[in-house]
Image (cartoon, grey):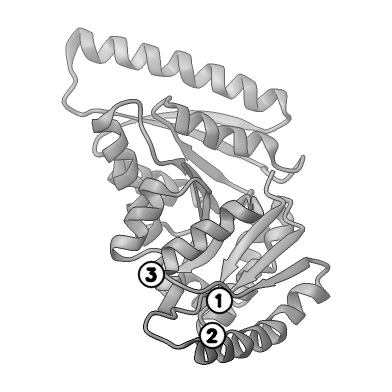
Amino acid sequence: MLTTVLVPVDFSDECFDVLAFARGASALGVRSVVLTHVVEASGMEGPIIAQKVDEARAKLQELAAPLAADGYDVELRVPTGDTFDALTALAAERGVDAILAGSHAKGIVSQLVEGSVSERLIRDASVPLLMARFDLLCAAQDPAALLRRFGDVVVLPTDFSLSASRALMRVLEMPKGSIKMLYLLHVIDPGLSGEQLRRHEEGAEFHLKALEAMAEQQGIPTSVVIRRGDPQREVLAELDERRATGVITGTRGRNAVQEALMGSVSMTLLRQASCPVLIVP
């Protein structure tokens, strides 16, 4: 279950949409928010760093008010240093269940999903990422509704790896009734044919049915889907066809090739998914 999330902000105009998005997190079981701003203090003297930290904390107190009014337990943190290192260290220290942010925003938030920082998070971070494309947040009349509706129609791509299993466990741990429909998706390599294709399809259906039974034992309506083609393209197509409101995916496959593939799918979802994305390492 997601009970505590880390929400980094950069004090840009865009961060207000991220904070509005976070207000819907209670639908997924979130009760505590660690609201943070990283002060990049490289080359600064001590007094200047202290001043910037105090200024950031004062701004965080203002931003925290709506979340506190919604009943969240809000903790304010102002670490210093490299953004990636500071966020991952804080996430580990606080034992948060996910980092929640908007993708393709400015400052810290954009660094979470663009360039080397995003690749490091997907490759190295031990905490899940809960994100939505920033243009979706900006266009939404109520960004919080994107999270409140996250569980209405959820797609979970799986390669049957340990990472994909952990993604399913996140689903099973969510509050009862929060996932209203779950689609378990497996994409088959389009290069397979003949007997090899038949065996792969049979094996995939067997594994999917076993996962479906696990989900339905928890009272989650579930359906299995097998598609054939490019994984990134097929996952996005499935989201569009199902009008998915949420997608949950792992990042690491069973071997080096699958691990690279799962990471690529995760990055594609961050940049192109039409709904919020929960990425589980």
Mark 2 → mark 3, Cα distance in angstroms: 14 Å
Q: Do the residues labelled 3 and 1 touch (CB within 8 Å)?
A: no
**Residue ID for mark 1:** 37
Q: Which residue is more in the foreground, 243 or 54?
A: 54
Dot 2: few (<14), some (14–19), or many (≥20) neighbours within 10 Å? some
x 42%, y 52%: residue = 240
Mark 3 → mark 1, Cα distance in angstroms: 13 Å
Q: Which residue is more in the foreground, 256 or 249?
A: 256
Mark 2 → mark 1, Cα distance in angstroms: 8 Å
**Position of residue 51 measured from the top left corner of the image (x, y, whole percent):** 58, 91
Report the amino acid beneath label 2: Phe
**Position of residue 19 measured from the top left corner of the image (x, y, whole percent):** 62, 74
| Quarter of the view holding residue 255 | top left
Quarter of the image containing the N terminus?
top right
**Residue ID for mark 2:** 11
Report the amino acid beneath label 1: His
- Depth check, mark 2 against mark 1: the one in front is 1
Secondary structure of the residue carrying tag 3 is helix
Report the amino acid beneath label 3: Gln
Does the image show residue 106?
Answer: no
**Position of residue 254 measured from the top left corner of the image (x, y, whole percent):** 35, 26
x 45%, y 88%: residue = 45
Q: Do the residues labelled 2 and 1 touch (CB within 8 Å)?
A: yes
Reply above or below: 190 against 140.
above
**Image-based side of 179 in relation to 68, left or right:** left
Dot 3: few (<14), some (14–19), or many (≥20) neighbours within 10 Å? some
Q: Which residue is more in the foreground, 130 or 182?
A: 130
**Residue ID for mark 3:** 111
Circle nearer the N terminus (3, 1): 1
x 23%, y 32%: residue = 257
**Image-based side of 217 in relation to 193, left or right:** right
x 18%, y 11%: residue = 194
